[in-house]
Amino acid sequence: MTTPIVNVIHENDAWMPPFRAAFEAEGVPLEEIDLGGGSFSAIDLDAEPAPGIYWSRMSASAHTRGHVHAKEHTRALLRWLESWGRRVVNGSDVLELEVSKVAQHGLLRSHGFDVPRTTAVFGRGGLVEAARAFEPPFITKHNQGGKGLGVRRFDSHADFDAYVAGEDFEEPVDGITLVQEYLTAREPFITRAEFVGGRFVYAVRVDTSAGSFELCPADACAVPGAEIEPFALRPEIDAEHPLVRRYEALLAEAGIEIAGIEFIETVDGRTVTYDVNTNTNYNPDVEAVSPVSGPRSIARFLGGLAAEEAGDAGNTGDTAATAGAFSRA
Ligand SMILES: Nc1ncnc2c1ncn2[C@@H]1O[C@H](COP(=O)(O)OP(=O)(O)O)[C@@H](O)[C@H]1O
Ligand SMILES: [Mg+2]
């Protein structure tokens, strides 16, 4: 039997400590493939990847940390792993979803979820005209982003026109800006439901009364001296909740195994789903009070898959380790 190993593909070292700790606590060996640090320089495409489970945590916002090619490198790496039949959690198809809010919107809409009315605008030129179809307030966001990239609220077309023409305009990395109806929350919070292995873990209530759209939950994003703690457990959204059940069905159908899905309950009684994240960072305050842990759930889930795989490899006598397929710079 080979050693059950989980290989995590990521690009941001600052997000890794909670996962390292969780894997250690669960006794699951974790190997890191850091595509942000430039530690991998080549893949021998004709060589078999090292055994183990592979888990992609590539982030749509990688380019904002100077890792401009990390997403492309992940695409290449995942295709190679999948071509050799490696078990990849949140693989190629999920990466395409992670890097496209257009794709997320389409997935949600086609599965019958209420989604915000949205126009995807290619380039800067068509923005002003496209926005005319939206009654202010409306918002913009980058198609490829996360962490609130390009998310801005506009209360008049004149403000928007000035923004598009001015120096503050934020170019989206893929040239696609979304113009979206502004959802007025019944109470000033959004909810994020977390799933691991396709199963519900917990729901987090994120206070939005401070008006910020950048809702990075990681410890690494904490603002020193911040007055309110915006993240709290939302216990009334539980595993039996009908919306949670629908999210689980969606994830199963789309092959998404680890995700955080965000929704807003509006003043006019809608429950609108607007964001599917596939590389959650779990908030430490929520983790401290929750009976279940996000990172520990991941370690257990992936540890289980790795043990299964290692057992199978053992049974077939296929134990050839080919860790040399990667070249570390
Ligand atoms: N249509 C909307 N109406 C009102 N607020 C929104 C809307 N879309 C997003 N927001 C707010 O902006 C935040 C960031 O937007 P989101 O779509 O989740 O992008 P990101 O992927 O960057 O997190 C949300 O968590 C929410 O607070
Ligand atoms: Mg979000």
Image (spheres, rainbow, N blue to C red):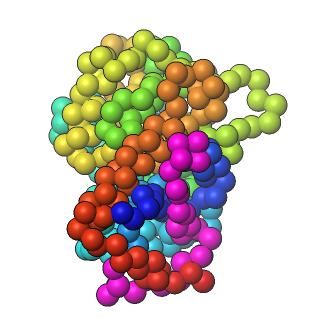
Q: Tell me the magenta residue range.
A: 24-49
Tell me the quadrant of the picture where the N terminus can be found: bottom left
Is 164 on the left-hand or right-hand side of 288? left
Q: Give the percent coordinates (x, y) of residue 16.
A: 61, 52
| Residue drawn at 80 percent across, 36 percent down | 224
Q: Residue at horizontal 29%, vertical 43%?
A: 105
**Relative depth, front residue between 29 and 43:** 29
Q: Is residue 34 visible?
A: yes
Up-down relation of residue 17 to residue 34 (above or below) = above
Quarter residue 52 falls in: bottom left
Q: Is residue 245 left or right of residue 89?
A: left
Measuring from the top left, give residue 108's x and y in whole percent.
Answer: 26, 38
**Residue 30 is covered by the magenta coloring:** yes
Determine if the magenta segment contains residue 259: no
The residue that appears at 55% across and 22% down in the rendered structure is 290
Q: Is residue 238 above or below residue 326?
A: above
Q: Quadrant of residue 111?
A: top left
Residue located at (53% from left, 42% from top): 26
Q: Position of residue 283 (x, y in %)?
A: 60, 34
Number of numbered markers: 0
